[in-house]
Amino acid sequence: MSDHSINAEKYWQANLRLILGSLVVWALASYGCAILLRPLLSGIHVGGTDLGFWFAQQGSILVFIALTFHYAWRMNKLDEEFGLQE
Amino acid sequence: MDQFTINLLFVGGSFALYFGIAFWARAGSTKEFYVAGGGVHPVLNGMATAADWMSAASFISMAGLIAAGGYANSTFLMGWTGGYVLLAMLLAPYLRKFGKFTVPDFIGDRFYSRTARLVAVACLITASVTYVIGQMTGAGVAFSRFLEVDKNTGLMIAAIVVFFYAVLGGMKGITYTQVAQYVVLIIAYTIPAVFISLQLTDTFLPAIGLFSTHTESGLPLLQKLDEVVRELGFRDYTADVDNKLNMVLFTLSLMIGTAGLPHVIIRFFTVPKVADARWSAGWALVFIALLYLTAPAVASMARLNLVSTIYPSGPTEQPIEYAERPDWIQTWETTGLIKFEDKNGDGRVQFYNDTPAFKDEATTRGWNGNELVVNRDILVLANPEIANLPGWVIGLIAAGGLAAALSTAAGLLLAISSAISHDLIKGSIKPDITDKGELVAARVSMFLAIIVATYLGMNPPGFAAQVVALAFGIAAASIFPALMMGIFSKRVNSKGAIAGMLAGLLSTLVYIFIFLGWFFIPGTANLANTPDNWLFGISPLSFGAIGAVINFAVAFTVSTMTEEPPKEIQDLVESVRYPQGAGGAVDH
């Protein structure tokens, strides 16, 4: 294997790890807190309702925005680290 | 000035703006017609994507469904935003690197097969046409209201406007027009919401107002709403759902459908660099979230205002008399989207949840059935009127609703026409077609798609947002898995991809058609669309997620049993993974 392809392989693995981590957060916010775990979180009150409701109608959207920008920022840095930027 | 004139001024003014921009930036070549020369800034592209994305379903229909369903319909909010996370990480940058025009281009090349390309075209057209039906439904509602005509007449007018609008510009015209449309629609959505939030909660931002105190009663807004709807026999607004499986699958179906919709994906071909494709997805989500964070507030506040209008002294007192109903109810009655029937003959408007559980209470109060039927798709458009806001706000929301419906319908028609003219005719049937012939074919296919969508839009298989949700299910089950496997697996071959797409598409379509009628033709459903009939309680709207699982499973199984993809395809997969050397969208 040439240096170039080892490097590329590392870059791809780093990308996959980042995606996996982001997807765990993505699923926890939406399927977790907003839907499946809502009964567990019902003790935490937010403005006339509970935390699960807040996640379903507001929180998860904010998490999605943060995730998307975080991914773009991290990947663009990774491109530079590996010398793969355009 | 009367309301009709004000509406006409706002709608006319905004249309003049869009047509002006479309004309100024009209497409000269086939390449510009599809991808705007590959030179649009990420923020502008994000805004255009947001306009393209937020359709009649988001603008006109969604808040009405949330108002009616409460917490249970949060699925729309999460599903239609969460998909951008998938798009940003799993598809957009790599498809940008691949650098062709369309989704079937990628599938055809990656799976080195003309059949795969044709199957992708079929999936794309099925999803897009279903989506356009939803748009036409919504646009029909908006036109019928602001021209004060019957809903089918409104639908015909919408069809004519959409056709001329989409034919005039290609992607380039549409990109700049859509930036203008985004601005119009977000202002139109936000201003009434701010007014209403101030009225009800003294809070400027509707998203904060939703979780604030209801000024009049001193209770938290959502708690007040729960109490009010409970008095009328409805489920609590914030009540949890019993069928969590269906809620999860529906949300998932909307999310992966988002990432599989051709007219959204095509947006990421129009940015200069791979890095910009990533930023674009983020910006698109920000601009979408501006509306999506406001929508749940609009929903709960409109529900509360609706009940207060019908029961001015509270839900335990007498409702209003029909003769004294507000003007907005009268105008909507002319469209046929609000219906009143005085079942107990007392001249008052009884509006409640007519269920066996509420029967005794209703009988005690001398009620003989719910008398007011309000179509859920009108709630957002009627919202400023329900809250007695000034006439210009009502004109503004009419303009915004039409902007939303038109921009998406145009984007979808473009995706359909490029699938037919570029992928089907040029890519398979008649490769030597001239540029001019291709444009003609594109326009003819737009025309046909509108005819079909208008016909089916007269008796839509659901409210606008529900029809659109079906389109997402179809995209989720067919296109998304093929794209994802094409990028993340070198092992999936043409046979696997074709079998997977067909299995996903057909299983989802059959499940939908069984409950909603074959090809959505009214009266052809095999089973009533009720939870009792659904397989494991999975609604036809949620089945896309199952279809996607079937697609993945079939594709992997078939691929492992057949030969590996050729070396050059594995190299192609390798190359889309790294941003270096993306270049411009390649002409071919």
Image (cartoon, rainbow, N blue to C red):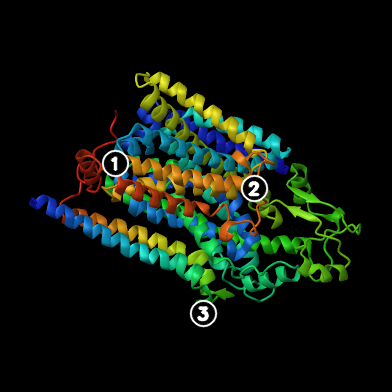
Q: For the residues labelled 2 and 3, say whether their Cβ atoms are less than 8 Å apart.
A: no
Q: Amino acid at mark 3?
A: Ile
In the visual, does B114 lie left or right of B182?
A: left
Instruction: Give the residue type that dot 2 points to.
Output: Trp
Residue under disc 1 on the same chain as residue under disc 3: no
Instruction: Name the residue located 45 percent from the left edge and 50 percent from the top edge.
Output: B258
Q: Which residue bears the numbered disc 1? A: B272
- For residue A44, which numbered disc appears in the image? 3
| Residue closer to the observer: B301 or B513 | B513
Residues packed near mark 3 inside 10 Å, few (<14), some (14 to 19) or many (20 plus) = few
**Which label is found at residue B17?**
none
Numbered label attached to residue B392:
2
For the residues marked 2 and 1, what is the alpha-carbon distance in whole angstroms? 40 Å
Up/down of B459 relative to B441, above or below: below
Residue closer to the observer: B478 or B188: B478
- Residue positioned most to the right: B345
- 1 or 3: mark nearer the eye: 3
Q: Disc 1 to disc 3, how far (Cα)?
A: 46 Å
Above or below residue A46? Residue B250 is: above
User: Dot 1: what SS?
Assistant: loop
Quarter of the picture containing the C terminus of chain B is: top left
The chain that hosts pointer 2 is B
Q: Is residue B149 above or below residue A84?
A: above
Report which quarter residue A70 is drawn in: bottom left
The answer to which of marks 2 and 1 sits earlier in the sequence is 1
Same subunit, labels 2 and 3: the answer reads no
- SS at mark 3? loop
Mark 2 on the same chain as mark 1? yes
Mark 2, mark 3: which one is toward the viewer?
Answer: 3
Task: Tell me where residue B459 appears, x and y as whole percent.
Answer: 67, 40
Name the chain letter of the residue that bears numbered label 3: A
Residue in the foreground of this view, choosing between B308 and B362: B362
